[in-house]
Image (cartoon, grey):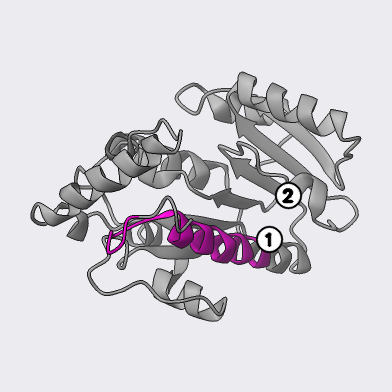
Amino acid sequence: AVDVDVPGAFWGMQQMTELLAARTQYFDRFLADATAAGIRQVVILASGLDARAYRIAWPSGTVVFEIDQPEVLAFKAATLAELNARPTADMRTVPIDLRQDWPASLREAGFDPARPCAWTAEGLLPFLPAEAQDRLLDNITELSAEGSRLASEIAATGRAGDGDQFWDSLKLVTKRWREHGLDIELGELGYSEEREDVADYLDTRGWQSVQTSLHRLLSDAGLPALWDGNAFVDNYYCASVKERRN
């Protein structure tokens, strides 16, 4: 990380490693709390290489649905099979792009909208356009029975767009990463457009949300806090519970 990171930059490999470690703990605790409360359906949205269906000691009867593009799920399945890894729950893959009718595919895989579910949107919402974020949250709400839970990662983009310092720093980081073989354009990964605040959006649609700041997340994990000028300092994590319908 020392060789790759740019001194004084808003972001770097060391910070990213620390964030991912703290984030993993947060979502692990969320799922542990959900299953302890009796929830036995879990949906991991844009699951990618998430291995929770393999590494968590799930209660008996838990069904874990993984939704992602077919190529991603096929690659992960083949890789884990080579390692002789076996799921620790009834794992069901839902190979579909979230831009398509994934709710129908989820139901076809055995999802029961009459039973509460624990949803995770980890590393997902900041990389969706504003309209796609709202549509995803609406679909989750429609599929969620009373008592369902949703954990999501929220990017507060307002501060990132202030002035040229953020973008200059971003260019420096991208250049240094490319020099070390990481062919990625950081500025093209997300969407800087205005969007609904997730906690507010959900709370007006029958959910009750509790926010955890990124600062608190890192502090609880015993990791260094982000300095005040960091573009991600206002990011937060959101745990929401679907309330009784009137």
> Looking at the image, which is closer to me, 163 or 125?
163
Label 2 Cα neighbours within 10 Å, binned few <14 / some 14-19 / many ≥20: many
By secondary structure, the bulk of the magenta-drawn segment is best described as helix
The x and y percentages for residue 155 are 34, 55
Alpha-carbon span between mark 1 and mark 2: 10 Å
Going from N to C along the chain, the mark reached first, 1 or 2, is: 1
Relative to 233, 20 lies left or right: right
Q: Which residues are magenta?
A: 6-29
Labels 1 & 2 near each other (Cβ < 8 A): yes
Residue occupied by mark 1: 31
Q: Amino acid at mark 2?
A: Arg
Q: Position of residue 201 (x, y in %)?
A: 34, 55
Residue sitting at 77 percent across and 33 percent down? 92
Q: Tag 1's secondary structure?
A: helix
Tag 2, which secondary structure?
A: helix
**Amino acid identity at mark 1:** Leu
Q: Examine the structure image and report whether residue 14 is included in the region drawn in magenta.
A: yes
Depth check, front residue: 52 or 230: 230
Residue 241 seen in the current view: no
Residue 112 can be seen, yes or no? yes
Image position, residue 102 (x, y; %): 56, 27
Residue at which label 2 appears: 52
Furthest residue toward left: 163
